[in-house]
Image: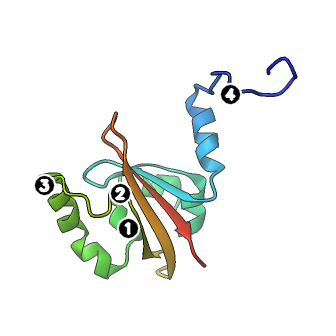
Amino acid sequence: ENRNGHNSYASGELPKTKNATAGILDASFDSLFVMTEQCTIEMVNKTSCDMFGWTEEEFIGQNIRMIMTSEVATNHDDYVSRYLETGIKKMMGTQREVVAQRKDGSTFPCVLGLSKCKESGLICGFIRDLT
């Protein structure tokens, strides 16, 4: 707490524990996926589980294709391979409206944003449900 009795992270007192970070990510209204360059899911937030119907345990270690329609999933590996080989970004650092698929097979329109963490090389995907 600062001298006024409020939590103050602006003073540089950021939460440093994994639980605090997970809590912050879980507070997001948007779905978050953290993936390797091979698109293996390393971390998800609570919104991802709520939005797609999978548990965190079901997501971790799986390929991100599990939330794509079959049409998109078919070409996904080629897109990723091309990006890794050439470094040419088509989706990285941008947002695009796409259709995603839930565990029950239902689909919904959403906005997908992708960015790459320079320090770790991990890819962050942010999804906002448009329904």
| Residue 43, above or below 16 | below
Secondary structure beneath dot 2 equals loop
For label 1, the crowd category at 10 Å Cα-Cα, with few meaning under 14, some 14 to 19 and many 20 or more, is some
Q: In the rendered image, which residue does mark 3 sit on?
A: 86
**Horizontal and vertical percent position of residue 12:** 63, 22
Looking at the image, tell me whether mark 4 or mark 3 is earlier in sequence order: 4
Q: Earlier in the sequence, mark 3 or mark 1?
A: 1
* Mark drawn on residue 66: 1
Does residue 122 appear in this view? yes
Kind of residue sitting beneath label 3: Thr
Instruction: State the residue lying farthest toward the right.
Output: 4
Foreground of the two, 96 or 21:
96
Q: Quadrant of residue 7?
A: top right
Q: How far, Cα to Cα, is label 3 from label 1?
A: 25 Å
Q: Is residue 21 left or right of residue 76?
A: right
Expressed as whole percent of the image width and height from the top left, the position of residue 113 reads 43, 61
Q: Is residue 103 visible?
A: no
For marks 2 and 3, give the one nearer the viewer: 3
Q: Residue at x 56, y 60 (%)?
A: 49
